Image: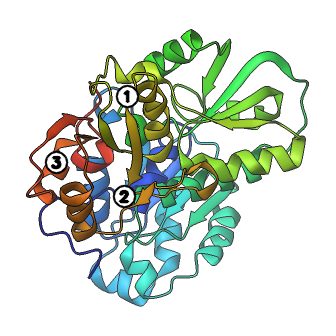
Amino acid sequence: MKKLLKHISPLAPDDSGACSVLYELGGITVICDAGGCAGNVCGFDEPRWFTKRSALFSAGLRDMDAILGRDALLVKKLTLITEQVDARFTAIVGTPVPAVIATDMKALERMSEKRTGLPCLAFRTDGTRLYDCGEEMVYARLFEQFAKEKLPVKPGRVGVLGATPLNTGELTSERIVSALKKQGYEDPVCFGMDSGLDDIISASGCERLLVIAPSGVKAARLMNERFGTPFEAGYPTGLFGEVSAGQGSRVLIMHQQFAANALREKLEAQGCEVTCASWFSMRPTFMREGDIQIKGEEDFCELAVNGGFDVILADEFFKRAAKGFTAKWIDLPQFAVSGRLGK
């Protein structure tokens, strides 16, 4: 029962992560559901609705359509959409129902491409994994599918992978780009945030890639293998503002891995002893000894109460699962946890 949440609300699932990456790329995204999962994505996990429009639809399948797997009906609806919406590709995002009935997503791709004449990307998200799994799936497929041509490298150009609201709490790339420039990155472009499909197609022209969340690592490695484009992990530390935990403090930081790692460096410069943890994926290559992958509420409560920490930096919503922790808690909003944007 590790995944049973008794104190905190559900975390953003993989289908939300997939939709987050696709949101600004100029495609038509169809969530393969009867309406409920699309409601969760639009109502809770995608905050850009207020500032940017996207062609994001629910398949709107009735119960029996979904249960019986009437794929032709979904493809027919998608074809009608392409006649009304100008798009460069289509995408179909899975949810629990197609996962349970074993919908053939590859078949949906082929049927859709034949009917619409547009590239179709279908993703086996199932709503049971966390958002970063869906993001990783989409980033990797997009770069595999569209970043095929070797282009001249533009000096100073840095492609940023992982810039989504779920990872950063930002709605636009403005603060991310500004913070990265202050860190010495000359010409950053955030794939999928204030940029479209053309930036992915021309990604081989980047001098290097900066991965600001674990979900972007697989795509970065693909680009390195295909074109030799170097990549590094990092995070725009300017997004944190001023954070102080007190010299000599034992600190636990809980966020997405690369954000936590970057904040650790800032606090270690203040003389703190820092451990990083995450409820989301932790890449072993970027972990230090003692870093922790949280598996459930009981594990986190044990760590918080008995870990000997003077300070915890994490979204305040996690306090509900840390009963007994009496030391200092510094709120570090994480949109995928609480639906609150960054400070």
* Residue occupying image coordinates x 82% and y 44%: 224
**Can residue 116 be seen by looking at this rendering?**
no
- Is 118 on the left-hand or right-hand side of 289? right
Q: Which dot, 1 or 2, sits closer to the camera?
A: 2
Q: Could you classify mark 3 by the number of other residues whose Cα lies within 10 Å: few (under 14), some (14-19), or many (20 or more)?
A: some
Alpha-carbon span between mark 3 and mark 2 = 13 Å
How far apart are the alpha carbons under marks 1 and 2? 22 Å
Q: Is residue 310 left or right of residue 323?
A: right
Give the quarter of the figure containing the C terminus.
Answer: top left
What secondary structure is found at the residue carrying circle 2? loop
Mark identifier at residue 317: 3
Badge 2 amino acid: Trp
Label located before the other in sequence (3 or 2):
2
Name the mark on residue 171: 1
Q: Quadrant of residue 184?
A: top right
Asked if marks 1 and 2 touch (Cβ < 8 Å), the reply is: no
Which kind of residue does numbered mark 3 sit on?
Phe
Left or right relative to 316: residue 21: right
Q: Nearer the viewer, mark 3 or mark 1?
A: 3
Please state the horizontal and vertical placement of residue 225, each as a whole percent of the image: 86, 50
- The local secondary structure at tag 3 comes to helix
Front-lying residue, 332 or 93:
332
Quadrant of the snapshot with the N terminus: bottom left
Q: Which residue is mark 2?
A: 279
